[in-house]
Image (cartoon, rainbow, N blue to C red):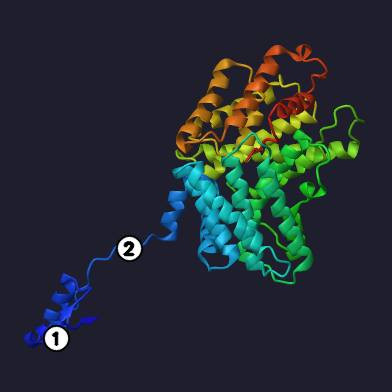
Amino acid sequence: MVYEPPEHSRDRKASHFLNTYSWHVALWQMLSEGNHTVYTPAICQPWSLSMADTRMEPQFFRGTTVSLKKLTLHMALSDSSPSSKAVLQSVLALSSLRLSGDGAASAYKAKAISSLSQSLKPDNTWDEASRTLVASMLLYLYETFHATYSGPSWAIYLCGVKKIAKSFCSGSKASFRMDNDKLCDWLYYHETMGHFSLVWWAPEDAPDICFLDATALLRQRYSWRAKTDEDGAGCSLAVMNTISSVFKAISLETKGPRISPKERQHLLELEKKLRKGVSELATSTSAPQVQLYSENNTLLHTIAALIFLNRAELAYSGEEPAHRALVKQGLKLIESLSACDAPWPVFTIAFELDEDWARILVLDLMSRTEKKLGYGRLTILRHLVETAWSYHDLGDDMREGQSGSYKARLHAVVRTAPYMPFFT
């Protein structure tokens, strides 16, 4: 832009330039002398999505795949629609919670909720519906990172995800985007762990939507088939399928009729799958010096699922040599972890511990995690674990009204939480 000087100075025959830097002058000098080698100034490179991924990972994307992280950030920055704004504000809320605390984060959360409410329409395309799913999932994660004693807010948002999936699958004609399969894998993990919380907390008059399998609905509606050799939220989908079957096959009922031969055969088949998985994963993860995060996490989930199945339905007392060896193997994995990214397997293994040195290993892991993350996300897990140990030390006969069975003790421990606990 050329600046024209006042009338009294025009006789100087000079023009003054604004927004001009030294390299502009150097470039003009080079071109005026016939030198056409263009001088390129040094310009700071903007952050790439991959750089943003690594900076966000310790906060709330821990354990998820790179493609899911990029997908979420792409959704947040794709356009100015309410659904994109909802994803963006949810990401900012989670980031602010980590960096600045609840004060700054709550403002972003309020904006995310407002944008999410505007984006909920019956005629949404798949892109719009997937963004509303992600925004609701991020708000669900926000509640797990910012747990309060006012109630299970995380469950409200997870049920919101189920409602969105049900509404979209039943009313929309839009086609399914197969590049979003990681979104379904992510939902599958949290839905499965949410089912465990729901069954063992056993809230009265829980709405039917809480028991809806949204992932199965998406699979059926769009003929989506997960690749079982891939990871969903850091755990093999093949193992997650087995864990989901275990959770659905085991009920809270402790005084009802014994399981039928057909049901027992199904449980034994699940046990066989889990034992095979433990054997194969233990062999593969013991070879390299540096074990992959996903392999360790998958093995930890497999061990915990086998312990839970044996104790809850297959009449293991917990004193069998094979069972104790399994607990020891899980404890060794817990000791090697730098942070607790999967509360459910840690809780299940810790439930079996009766020696102080082993319990200290679990408490050390929780302390390392809280120190690394900077907030008390594992407060409720610590409460449940310490309550389970107290029940174990007191003995079954010290708890009036309890049968002493594994399922009765598990239900009693979970119910000591101030609200329905989360295990994700």
Which residue is identified by label 1?
7
- Residue at (48%, 41%) from the top-left corner? 101
The amino acid sitting under disc 2 is Gln
Above or below, 103 relative to 31: above
Judge left or right: residue 30 versus residue 280: left
In the image, residue 374 sits, relative to residue 59, either above or below, namely above
Where is residue 413 drawn, in percent x and y? 71, 25
289 with respect to 415 (left or right): left
Q: Examine the image and state in which quarter residue 318 appears.
A: top right
Q: Which mark is residue 282?
A: none
Asked which quadrant contains residue 222, the reply is bottom right
Q: Label 1 sits on what residue type? A: Glu
Does dot 1 land on a helix, a strand or a loop? helix
The quadrant in which residue 402 appears is top right
Q: Name the residue under label 2.
A: 45
Does residue 255 appear left or right of residue 413 in this picture? right
